Amino acid sequence: MAEFYDVIVVGSGIAGLSFALKVAEAGHRIAVITKKNSAESNTNYAQGGIAAVTSKKDEVNMHVADTLVSGDGLCDESAVREILRDGAASIDQLTERGVAFTQLEDGRASLGKEGGHTKRRIFHVQDVTGKVIEEALVKSIEESPNIDNFEHHFAIELITSSKLCKHEGRKLDEEDRVIGLYALNTQNDQVETFAASAVLLATGGIGQVYQFTTNPFIATGDGIAMAYRAGVEVRNMEFIQFHPTAFYSKDSSERFLISEAVRGEGAILRNMKGEAFMEKYDARKELAPRDVVARAIDSEMKETGARHLWLDARPIPKKKLHEHFPNIYEHCAKQGIIMESDMIPIVPAAHYLCGGIKTDLNAQTSLSGLYACGEVASTGLHGANRLASNSLLEAVVLANRGALSVEKYLSIAKGEVTVIPDWIGGNVRDSDERIVLLHNWDEVKRTMWDYVGIVRTSKRLERARTRIQTLDKEINDYYWNFKVDESLLELRNLILVAGLIIDCALQRKESRGLHFITDYPEKNDAPCDTKVRRKL
Ligand SMILES: Cc1cc2nc3c(=O)[nH]c(=O)nc-3n(C[C@H](O)[C@H](O)[C@H](O)COP(=O)(O)OP(=O)(O)OC[C@H]3O[C@@H](n4cnc5c(N)ncnc54)[C@H](O)[C@@H]3O)c2cc1C
C-alpha cells in the first residue's frame, strides 16, 4: 500500500522548498522527495542574487522593460508584469525565513547591477546568495511538523489515473490526473510508491546535457522528462542560456561560474592579445544581455582558435573584490589566479534553461493535479532569454501562487488513490554493458556541445537528432531489461531532454534570443512558442 500525502514536492531547491513551506503552513501533509541531500541544487550555487525593485530610484515598469528587451519579443508581457510586481514581497519573505541580505554601512540594502538591468536592483548575500537561501529554507522544512523529507530518493515516473486504468484494463471515465509517483531509494536500491492528490515538480534545470556547464550534477532534466512521458506540454526548449564567463580549466570539464556581477562592478572582457572587444559587438559592452556577450566570446574564440579568453577584474578596487566576491576570489586563488593582479581565464558554459514545462501563473501544468515551478517550468517570464537574477525571483513568486492554487485544488480534489501497483523492474545487472552506458553519457554531452551549442545550423541539428535517436533506442532497451539505478535513470532523462531541445530548435526557423541559427539569421515577424507533447 502506497503512503498517502496531500502533496508530493519533487526537488529541494528554492522553488520546491518555498512551495512546501507555504502549503504545509496551511495545514496540509507534504512529502519532499529529493535525489541527493537536501541542499544539493542549482539554488545552492547561485551567486549574483535575486532581482527586485525596492529603491526609490527604480520602478517595476523599468524592471519589466529590461526583462522584455532581454526576452527578445517572446516574453508573455502579462506574466512579466505579474511576477515582477511581487519582487519586494519575495525579498521580505526570504528575509523572514532567515536570509540576511548584504547591507551597506548605513543599513540600506546593498544592490548589485548585472547585464541587461538599467538599475541596481540585485539583492545578494556577498557572492553566496543561493547557499544562504538554501540553508535558511532547509532549516525551515526540518522544523515543519507537516513535512516529511525524503533525501536520496530519486523520482522516476509520475503515476496518472490514465496509466492506472490501462494497467487495470479499465476505461478512464474522468479527466486524466496525477495520483502519485515511483521513487528509487538510492540507499537501499528499492523503488517506493508514493500516492498524493497533487504533485509539484521543482526539479530544476538541464545543464548536465552539455559537456561544459555551470550546473551541479543534479541538473539532468528529470522533471521535464517525467512530465513529457506523462503527456504534459513542454515548450521553448531551444532557449538554453550559455553563461559567458565560466572559469576555464584545461584539466576539468567542471565550469565554476564567475558571476555577471563581476562585470557589473567594472571587469572587462579581453581577447588573447589583451584587447577589450565588446564594443565591436554591442554598445552596452560588458553589460549587454548574456546571449550577446556569449556569442561575442564564441566569435572571438573561433576567429583566433583560442581555448579561452580573459576577464580582467583588475579595475575593481581590492576592497570591493574581497567584500563582494569572497567565494569567487577564493576559487580563483586556489587555481593560482589573484584577481587584483591576474586576469581570469574564461569560457562560456551551459547555464540556464529558459523553456520547460508550460504552466500558467498558478504553476498549473496541462495535467490536472500536476504543478511545476522554478527552472523546470516555463511561465512566459524569460521569453527567448532570461534576464540575470530573475530566476530566483520567479521561483519564489510561482511557489507562492502555486501554493494558493494547490490549496483550492485540494479542497475539491477527487478521493485519494492508495491502491497503486508496485513497481515491476528488470533484475539483470551486467557490468560489461554498464561501460557502454558510461560512453553514452559522454556521447550525449559532446553531441549537444558540438552540434546544439551557442551557434547552430540546421545540418548540425539534424546530425545531432540522428545520434540522439540511436542513443534513445539503446537506453530504453536498458531501462526495460536492467535493474534501474540513478545513473541509468539520469541518462535516460538526459537523452530524452536532448531530443526535446533538438526538436524545438528544428521547429524554430529564425534566430531569436538564445537560439542563433546561421540558416535563418533573421527574426520572424510573428514570434511564437515551440511545443513538444507526447501523444498518449
Ligand atoms: C552557478 C549558478 C549560479 C546562478 N546564479 C543565479 C543568480 O545569481 N540569480 C538567479 O536568479 N539565478 C541564478 N542561477 C539560476 C538559479 O540558481 C536556478 O535557476 C534556481 O536556483 C533553480 O531553482 P529550482 O528550485 O527550480 O531548482 P534547483 O535549485 O536546481 O533544485 C532542484 C532540486 O530537484 C532535485 N531533483 C532533481 N531531479 C530529481 C529527481 N528525479 N528526484 C528527486 N529530486 C530531484 C535536486 O536534487 C534539487 O534538490 C544560477 C545557477 C547556477 C548553476
Image (spheres, rainbow, N blue to C red):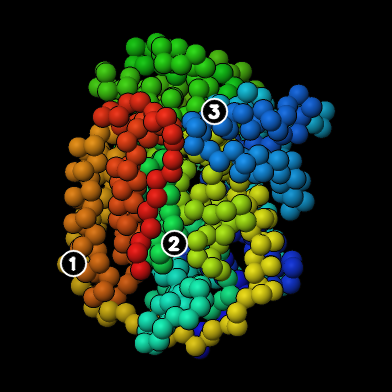
Residue denoted by label 3: 69
Whether residue 165 is visible, yes or no, is: yes
Kindly report the distance in space between the C-alpha atoms of the residues bearing marks 1 and 2.
32 Å
The residue under the point 23% across, 52% down is 468
Say which of 358 and 192 sits in front. 358
Residue 400 appears in which quarter of the rendering?
bottom right
Find residue 357 and name its label. none
**First in residue order: circle 3 vs circle 1:** 3
**Disc 2 secondary structure class:** loop
Neighbor class of circle 1 (other Cα within 10 Å; few <14, some 14-19, many 20+) is: few
Residue 470 appears in which quarter of the rendering?
bottom left
Cβ atoms at labels 1 and 2 below 8 Å apart: no
Residue 189 position, x and y percent, is: 39, 76
Find residue 232 and name its label. 2
Residue 171 lies, with reference to residue 496, above or below; the image says below
**Which quadrant: the C terminus?**
bottom left
Find residue 433 and name its label. 1
Looking at numbered disc 1 in the image, what kind of residue is underneath it?
Glu
Looking at numbered disc 3 in the image, what kind of residue is underneath it?
Val
Left or right of 357 in this view: 409: right
Residue 508 lies, with reference to residue 499, above or below; the image says above
Kindly report the distance in space between the C-alpha atoms of the residues bearing marks 3 and 1.
49 Å
Residue 534 position, x and y percent, is: 35, 61
Residue at mark 3: C-beta within 8 A of ligand 1: no
**Disc 1 secondary structure class:** helix
Say which of 78 and 210 sits in front. 78
The residue under the point 44% across, 40% down is 528
Neighbor class of circle 3 (other Cα within 10 Å; few <14, some 14-19, many 20+) is: many
Looking at numbered disc 2 in the image, what kind of residue is underneath it?
Val
